[in-house]
Amino acid sequence: MKYAWLVIGVLAAQFLAIAIAFPQVDGDLHWQRWLGRTIAEHGAIPRVLGNETFSAAGAPWTPQEWLFSLAAAHATGDRSWALFAGGIALCALAALAIASWHAERRGASPRAIVVCLVPAGLGLFESFGVRVQVAAWPLLALFLFLLDLEGPLAFAAIAVAAVWSNVHASAMLAPILASAVALGTFVDDRGPSLAFRRRAIVAVGSAIAICANPFGVGLPLYALSLFNSSLKSYIVEWDVTNLGNTSFVLGALPLLALACIVVPQTRRSVRDLILLVVFSYLLLGAARNIALFGLVALPIVAPALTRAFTFFASSPPPRDARAVRAENIARIVMPAIGLVLALVVGIGLVRSAERTKDTLAARAIESLDSLAGERRLFCADFAWCGLAVGKPHVRVFLDGRADPYPLTVWRDFDTIARLRPAWRDVLARYAVDTIVVAKDDPLDQALALGKPKAWRQSYMDKHYRVWIRQVRSVVDEHGGRARRSPA
C-alpha cells in the first residue's frame, strides 16, 4: 500500500475540503439536524411525518438516519462542525484504505492497488458529501474484508452488520453479500467446506443482525420496498447510470473494463465473479451505486491485475539490510507525503471562491422568516425545502426526506414543477401560497406571466426568486373545496 497513501492523501484533501468548507452541497443536512433535535427533545424517534409538511402529515416514516442525525444535531459550532464533517470525510478515506488493505492481503502489488484505487476514489465523488450513506461506506468495505477471512474472526462481520443497520438502510446488502460469497465458496470448494459453512452462518447471522435497530424488521422491509418503488423515477440518484455521470466515466467504468479484461485471464473464483456480477447490475441500475461498485471491485480487480501482467507483479521481499531499511522508510515517508499533499491541496480548495456559491436557495429560504402568517411552501427542487423543515410558520409540500411521501404527492409535485396540464389547479388544491424557484425556470416564467396576476415576488437574488400568492387559498377542516381569501 506504500504508493496508495499518495493517492489517499490527495483524495483526503478534496474530501475534507468538500465536507468542512462546502456544507451547502446537500440539502438533507438541515432536516437531519432537525430530526436529531426532535429525537433528543422527545426521547423517541418519530415514525410518521408531522405538521412540518402539509401534503402528507401522518404518512408512515422510517427515519433510518436517526443516529447520524443525533450526531449532526450536536455539530452546531465551527469546531464541532469541523470534527463532525471531517469525521464523515474520514469515513470515505477509511473505506478506500480498507479496500486497498483487503486487496493487499489478497496478493495485489502496490502498483496494481494504485491503478485500481484511483478510479475507485474518483467513483466516490458524485455521491460524496456530509451524508449518511458516506458513513456506511467503511462498514461495507469492512464487512467484505471480514467475510474474506478464513478464521473465526470472519464472524465479526455479523457485528458489523448490526452496526451498519443503525447507520443506513444499505445494511440490507449484508446478508445478500454473505449469501453470494457463501454460494461462490460452495462452488469453488466443490461442496460444503468449512469456509462455506462459516460464510453461511454469517449470512444467516447478518439477516438477523440487520434487525438490531430501533425499527427491527421494519428496516429491511423498508429497504426492500425501495428496490422497486416508483418514487425512484423522481429522484436523480436513482436514475439509471449513464455516460453523463462523471464518477461512472472516470471511476466505475475503467474498473469494470479492467475486471472484464483481467479477471477471466487469472485463476477464476466463482465467489469473486458473483460479487462482480451483483454489483455490476447494481452499478448500471442506479447512479447512487457507483461508489459501492468501486469499493467492492478494488479488492477483486487489483489482485487479478497483479497476476495477469508481469509489470504489476509483486516485487520479492528485500533481503539485504539496505533494501529492508529503504522499504521501512518508504512505509513512513509515503503516508507523510500523502498528509502534506492533503494539507496543501485542502488549503487551496478551502480558499476557493466556489465555497461561497449558493446551490440550495439558502438565502431565498431564509427570506421566508420575514413573511407574515403560516406559509405553505412549494420548492421547484424538493431538496431546497429540506432547509425549511421545522421552520416556524412554514410547512412544506415535499422535502429531501422523500421516501415517506406518497406517490400521489410525487405525481402532483411533478405536475407543478414541469408545468403539466392542470398545474395551477394542483397548486390551488394544496393551497400553496409560497414558491421558491430558480430564476428564469419555466415555472418562474409562468408565475411571472400569469393572468390575472395571482402571484407577486417577495424575494429575488442572482439565482432564485420567491413568489407569494396575492390571495391565498384555504382548505376547510372537513376537506371541502378550496376557497379564496385575502392574503
Image (cartoon, rainbow, N blue to C red):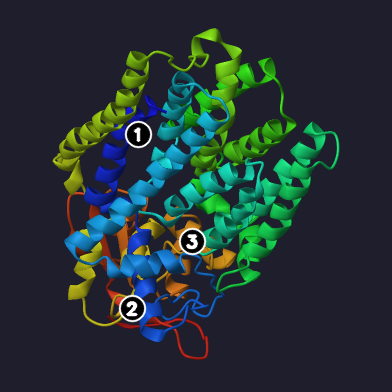
Check disc 2 and report its element: helix, strand or loop: strand
Q: Is residue 63 visible?
A: yes
Q: Is residue 231 visible?
A: no
Of residue 107 and residue 115, the one placed in the foreground of this image is 107
- Residue lying furthest front: 321
Q: Amino acid at mark 1?
A: Ile
Q: Earlier in the sequence, mark 3 or mark 1?
A: 1
**226, above or below 302, in the image:** below
Q: Earlier in the sequence, mark 2 or mark 1?
A: 1
Q: CA distance from mark 2 to mark 1?
A: 55 Å
Residue 44: x and y, percent? 46, 82
> Pointer 2: what residue?
472
- Between disc 3 and disc 2, the foreground one is 3
Residue 111: x and y, percent? 44, 19
Check disc 1 and report its element: helix, strand or loop: helix
- Residue lying furthest bottom: 478
> Pointer 1: what residue?
8
Tag count? 3
Packing grade of label 2 (10 A; few <14, some 14-19, many >=20) is many
Packing grade of label 1 (10 A; few <14, some 14-19, many >=20) is many
> Pointer 3: what residue?
167
Occupied quadrant, residue 373: bottom left
